Image: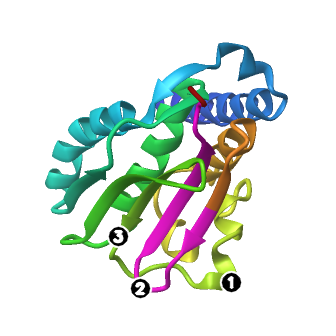
């Protein structure tokens, strides 16, 4: 009975994740857009994930270059960056440096999550963000390969661009248009 309940919970979680991706891709969440200071949001996530990183014997640091106001959905942006930070912590060995950074470039806020872990081969970078894709090393962990698909959908909803770099470590940078004064 317990196994059946656990399996049912897993199926419900899968459907909830798929529904959330569909809602984001459909643009339904655009109505919740409001000014968001990415620096404040990322600083808050740094505080939340600091103890998690420490428990996993990682080093989490922030490099935030002042306020960066964008138009977006705070809840979805929190989910996006939480997924990236969590993946950097879970999929790298102990002792890895994880960095959350924020800067500006050509009228965009550039928010990035990077690590100095083993990295991902360049030919797999785009696959990481496809639904249900899981690298061989992560298939023994719980999950369905939907976290980064949700990240990609949220990036698209916000009119942002995503850049993935690195073979020694991984850097996922989001270029999000700054809110004009």
From the viewer's perspective, is residue 44 above or below residue 111?
above
Q: Residue sitting at 57 percent across and 53 percent down?
A: 174
Q: Residue sitting at 68 percent across and 54 percent down?
A: 161
Q: Residue sitting at 16 percent across and 44 percent down?
A: 51
Q: Where is residue 179 in the image (x, y as percent from the top left)?
A: 59, 31
Specify the segment rendered in magenta. Answer: 163-179
- Of the two numbered discs 1 and 3 on the same chain, state the one appearing first in sequence: 3
Q: Where is residue 6 in the image (x, y as percent from the top left)?
A: 51, 33
Q: Give the residue pinned by disc 1.
A: 123
User: In what element is the residue under mark 1?
Assistant: helix
- Of the two numbered discs 1 and 2 on the same chain, state the one appearing first in sequence: 1
From the viewer's perspective, is residue 111 above or below residue 171?
above
Answer left or right for 169 relative to 62: right
Q: Where is residue 115 in the image (x, y as percent from the top left)?
A: 35, 69
Q: Give the residue pinned by disc 2.
A: 168
Q: Do the residues labelled 1 and 2 touch (CB within 8 Å)?
A: no
Q: Do the residues labelled 1 and 3 touch (CB within 8 Å)?
A: no
Q: Give the residue pinned by disc 3.
A: 92
Instruction: Give whichever of 33, 95 is nearer the camera.
Output: 33
Magenta stretch: helix, strand or loop mostly: strand
């Amino acid at each position: 009975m317990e196994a059946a309940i656990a399996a049912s919970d897993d199926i419900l979680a899968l459907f909830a994740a798929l529904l959330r991706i569909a809602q984001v891709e459909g643009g339904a969440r655009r109505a919740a857009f409001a000014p968001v200071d990415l620096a404040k949001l990322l600083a808050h996530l740094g505080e939340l994930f600091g103890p998690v990183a420490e428990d996993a014997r990682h080093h989490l640091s922030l490099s935030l270059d002042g306020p960066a106001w964008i138009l977006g959905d705070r809840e979805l942006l929190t989910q996006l960056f939480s997924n990236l930070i969590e993946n950097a912590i879970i999929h790298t060995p102990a002792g890895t440096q994880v960095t959350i950074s924020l800067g500006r470039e050509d009228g965009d806020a550039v928010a990035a999550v990077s690590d100095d872990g083993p990295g991902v081969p360049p030919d797999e970078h785009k696959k990481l963000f496809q639904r249900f894709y899981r690298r061989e090393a992560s298939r023994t962990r719980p999950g369905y390969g939907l976290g980064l698909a949700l990240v990609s959908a949220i990036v698209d909803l916000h009119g942002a661009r995503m850049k993935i770099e690195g073979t020694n470590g991984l850097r996922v940078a989001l270029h999000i248009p700054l809110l004009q004064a």
